[in-house]
C-alpha cells in the first residue's frame, strides 16, 4: 500500500512539471519571507523526488539538491505533517544525516499538499544553532507553505501546462527564460522551435481524421521530445503544433545542428504521421540576458518558417528574414483594421479593350491598400498573406460590395461597361459565396452577365471538385467566368474542357515576347489562342505594352487585350473621363479610315 501511494505521489509531482525547472521569482519571494520571519540563514521550497530533495527555490544554499535518504523534508512529504528538529545532534533519526554533517542544527518544515492529498515536499527553514519554534512561527510557516501550493496550482491551472501534451506552455517558457537570464547572464544558448505541420496540413489532418487523432499526434510528439531530451531539460508546447526547448549551455553550433538533425530523423522514422505532416526546425542562437524572452521564441519560430522549404529541414535564425516575417505579420494584423476603415482600401480599374475596334468593353477591379504609416503596399505582397487567413472572406466581400456599387452607378449613367472581379482558392471553401454574389446582383438590380469572375488555373486545381461545383453554380446563374493566367497553371486539357468558363486570359509572361518580335514566343501565343478557340473560349491577352504586340495578337484572332499600352489601372473618378477620351479616339480613327 505504501509503495502504491508513493508511486501516486511521484506521478502527481511529475505532472506538475516543476522538477528541474529554473528558479522563479514567484517562489523565491516566499522563500525569502520565510528566512526573514524566522531570522534564519537558510530556507527552501524542497520537492521530494524518488531519490533526492530538489530545491525549486532556495536561500542560503549553493547546491540545488541533496539525497533524499535521512532528509527531513522527505518525512514531511510522506506524512503530510509538519516536522520540527530542534537539535540535529540530539536526533536519533537525523544526527548522521547529510544536513547534520553540513552543520545544520535546527529544521522546521511545513508540508506542500495537493488537492488530491499528495505530499510534494516542504517549505523549510534551517539554522546552525539549536532552537525551538513558537506556535505563531509554526502557523506562519504553514501559511507560507499554503502560499507556495497556491502558486504551484496557479501555474498549473492558468496557461502554464497544456492540457493535451502535458507540457509547459509558451507563458512558462517566457517566465523560465527570464529567470534563467537572471541566474546565468551571459551564457550562450540555442532556442529550438519544432513545427510538426503547416497550418493547412493540420487542418486537412483534422478534417480527415478528427480532432482526437490530432490530439494523439500532439501527445505522441510530446512524448518523443521528452524522451529525446535529458531529464534536466524542459520541452514546451508553444503553438497549435509547435514545440520549443533550449540547448545545453555553450554548445558548438555545427555539432548541435548535426545532433538535432540526427535526433529528429530518428523520431520521424517511427512517427505514426510521418507521411501526412512535414516537420520544420528553427534554431535561434542568443545570449542570456541580451535578448528579450519574447524575441527569443519569435526568432526561433521565424527560423522554422524559413525551414519550410523541405520536410525535416533546419534553419538558423536570420535577422533579415525575421524582419520580413515581422512585416508580414504586421500587414496581416493591420489589414483587419483597414477593412473597417474608410480611407485605406480602394479599387482601381484596368480597362479591357476589343482589339478589333479599340473600344473599352470591360474593366477588371483591382484592390489597392494605402497603409497609414507604411504607404502604398503592393498587392503582390499583401494579397498572398491574407488569402491564407479568415480575412480572405471579408476581403472578397469588401471587393464585391464596392465593385458592384460602382457597376450599379455605371448602369444608372447608361454605361454598357462590364466588370470582372478576382477570387482566390481560399474562396472555394465559402459555401455561401455563390449566394452572396447573386444577392449582391439582385440588391442592385444588375444583370448577372455584366459580372465576370476571374480565377487562376492554380486556384481551380487546388480544390478541383469544389471549384467545378461552384463554377457550375455561377455559370447557371448567368455570371461570366474567366480563367486567369492561362498557360501558367497545372491543369490538364481534359479538365479545362470541362470548365464552364467563357474566357481565358493569356498571362503577360507570354505576351511580353511579342513586343520584341520573338518568333518562338509568337508561335507559342498563336498556338495558345488557337487552342483556346477550339476549346470554345474567348481570348484576352494581358500585359500588352506595344502597338506591335497588339497588332500581332489581333492577327492571331485574340479578341480582347489589356495592358499599359491602353491604360494603367484607373481610380473610379478618373475612369469616366478616360472612357470618353477613348471613345473619341476610336471614333476619330474610324472616320479617318
Image: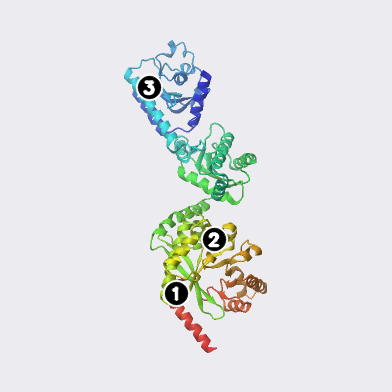
| Count of all numbered marks drawn on residues in the image | 3
Q: Which colour scheme is used?
A: rainbow
Distance between the alpha carbons at the discs numbered 1 and 2: 32 Å
Residue annotated with mark 2:
470
Residue annotated with mark 3:
40
Q: What element carries label 1?
A: helix
Residue drawn where x is 51% and y is 58% of the image: 427
Labelled disc at residue 489? none
Tag nearer the camera, 1 or 2? 2
Asked if residue 573 can be seen in this view, the reply is no
Asked if residue 426 can be seen in this view, the reply is yes
Labelled disc at residue 575? 1
Q: Where is residue 537 in the image (x, y as percent from the top left)?
A: 60, 71
| In the rendered image, the vertical position of residue 432 relative to residue 56, given as above or below | below
Tag nearer the camera, 3 or 1? 1
**Considering depth in this image, is 319 or 103 the residue closer to the camera?**
319
**Considering depth in this image, is 593 or 410 the residue closer to the camera?**
410
Which quarter of the rendering shows the C terminus? bottom right
Left or right, 528 with respect to 393, comes to right
| In the rendered image, the vertical position of residue 590 relative to residue 408, given as above or below | below
Dot placed on the residue nearer the N-terminal end, 2 or 3: 3
Dot placed on the residue nearer the N-terminal end, 3 or 1: 3
Task: Determine crowd level at label 1: few under 14, some 14-19, many 20+ residues with C-alpha closer than 10 A.
Answer: some
Q: Where is residue 67 in the image (x, y as percent from the top left)?
A: 51, 21
Left or right, 543 with respect to 33, comes to right
Amino acid at each position: 500500500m505504501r509503495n502504491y501511494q508513493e508511486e501516486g505521489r511521484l506521478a502527481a509531482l511529475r505532472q506538475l512539471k516543476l522538477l528541474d525547472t529554473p528558479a522563479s521569482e514567484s517562489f523565491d519571494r516566499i522563500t525569502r519571507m520565510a528566512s526573514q520571519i524566522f531570522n534564519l540563514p537558510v530556507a527552501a521550497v524542497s520537492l521530494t523526488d524518488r531519490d533526492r530533495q530538489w530545491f525549486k527555490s532556495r536561500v542560503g544554499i549553493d547546491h540545488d539538491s541533496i539525497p533524499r535518504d535521512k532528509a527531513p523534508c522527505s518525512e514531511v512529504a510522506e506524512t503530510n505533517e509538519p516536522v520540527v528538529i530542534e537539535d540535529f545532534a540530539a536526533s536519533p533519526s537525523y544526527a548522521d544525516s547529510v544536513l547534520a554533517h553540513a552543520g545544520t542544527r535546527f529544521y522546521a518544515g511545513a508540508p506542500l499538499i495537493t488537492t488530491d492529498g499528495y505530499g510534494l515536499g516542504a517549505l523549510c527553514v534551517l539554522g546552525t544553532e539549536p532552537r525551538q519554534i513558537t506556535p505563531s512561527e509554526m502557523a506562519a510557516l504553514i501559511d507560507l507553505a499554503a502560499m507556495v501550493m497556491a502558486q504551484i496550482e496557479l501555474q498549473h491551472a492558468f496557461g502554464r501546462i497544456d492540457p493535451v501534451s502535458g507540457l509547459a506552455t509558451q507563458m512558462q517558457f517566457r517566465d523560465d527564460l527570464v529567470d534563467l537570464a537572471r541566474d546565468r547572464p551571459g551564457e550562450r544558448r540555442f532556442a529550438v522551435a519544432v513545427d510538426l505541420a503547416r497550418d493547412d496540413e493540420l487542418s486537412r489532418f483534422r478534417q480527415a481524421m478528427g480532432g482526437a487523432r490530432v490530439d494523439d499526434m500532439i501527445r505522441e510528439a510530446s512524448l518523443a521530445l521528452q524522451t529525446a531530451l535529458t531529464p534536466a531539460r524542459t520541452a514546451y508546447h508553444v503553438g497549435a503544433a509547435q514545440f520549443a526547448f533550449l540547448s545545453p549551455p555553450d554548445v558548438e553550433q555545427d555539432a548541435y545542428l548535426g545532433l538535432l538533425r540526427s535526433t529528429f530523423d530518428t523520431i520521424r522514422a517511427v512517427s505514426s504521421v510521418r507521411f501526412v505532416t512535414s516537420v520544420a526546425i528553427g534554431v535561434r542562437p542568443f545570449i542570456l540576458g541580451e535578448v528579450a524572452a519574447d524575441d527569443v521564441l519569435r526568432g526561433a519560430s521565424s527560423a522554422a518558417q524559413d525551414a519550410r522549404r523541405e520536410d525535416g529541414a533546419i534553419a538558423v535564425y536570420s535577422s533579415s528574414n525575421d524582419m520580413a516575417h515581422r512585416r508580414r505579420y504586421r500587414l496581416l494584423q493591420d489589414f483587419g483594421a483597414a477593412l473597417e476603415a474608410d480611407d485605406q482600401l480602394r479599387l482601381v480599374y484596368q480597362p479591357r479593350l476589343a482589339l478589333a475596334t479599340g473600344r473599352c468593353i470591360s474593366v477588371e477591379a483591382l484592390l489597392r491598400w494605402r497603409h497609414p504609416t507604411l504607404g502604398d503596399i503592393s498587392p503582390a505582397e499583401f494579397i498572398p498573406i491574407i488569402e491564407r487567413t479568415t480575412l480572405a472572406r471579408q476581403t472578397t466581400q469588401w471587393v464585391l460590395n464596392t465593385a458592384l456599387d460602382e457597376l450599379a452607378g455605371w448602369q444608372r449613367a447608361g454605361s454598357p461597361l462590364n466588370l470582372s472581379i478576382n477570387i482566390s482558392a481560399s474562396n472555394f471553401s465559402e459555401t455561401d459565396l455563390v449566394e452572396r454574389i447573386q444577392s449582391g446582383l439582385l440588391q442592385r438590380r444588375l444583370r448577372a452577365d455584366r459580372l465576370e469572375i476571374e480565377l487562376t488555373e492554380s486556384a481551380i486545381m487546388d480544390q478541383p471538385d469544389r471549384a467545378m461545383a461552384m463554377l457550375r453554380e455561377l455559370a447557371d446563374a448567368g455570371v461570366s467566368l474567366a480563367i486567369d493566367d492561362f498557360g501558367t497553371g497545372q491543369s490538364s486539357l481534359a479538365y479545362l474542357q470541362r470548365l464552364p468558363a467563357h474566357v481565358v486570359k493569356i498571362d503577360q509572361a507570354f505576351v511580353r515576347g511579342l513586343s520584341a518580335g520573338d518568333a518562338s514566343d509568337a508561335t507559342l501565343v498563336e498556338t495558345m489562342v488557337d487552342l483556346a478557340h477550339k476549346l470554345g473560349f474567348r481570348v484576352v491577352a494581358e500585359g500588352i505594352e506595344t502597338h506591335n504586340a497588339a497588332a500581332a495578337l489581333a492577327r492571331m484572332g485574340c479578341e480582347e487585350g489589356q495592358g499599359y499600352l491602353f491604360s494603367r489601372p484607373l481610380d473610379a473618378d478618373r475612369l469616366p473621363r478616360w472612357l470618353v477620351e477613348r471613345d473619341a479616339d476610336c471614333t476619330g480613327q474610324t472616320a479617318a479610315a
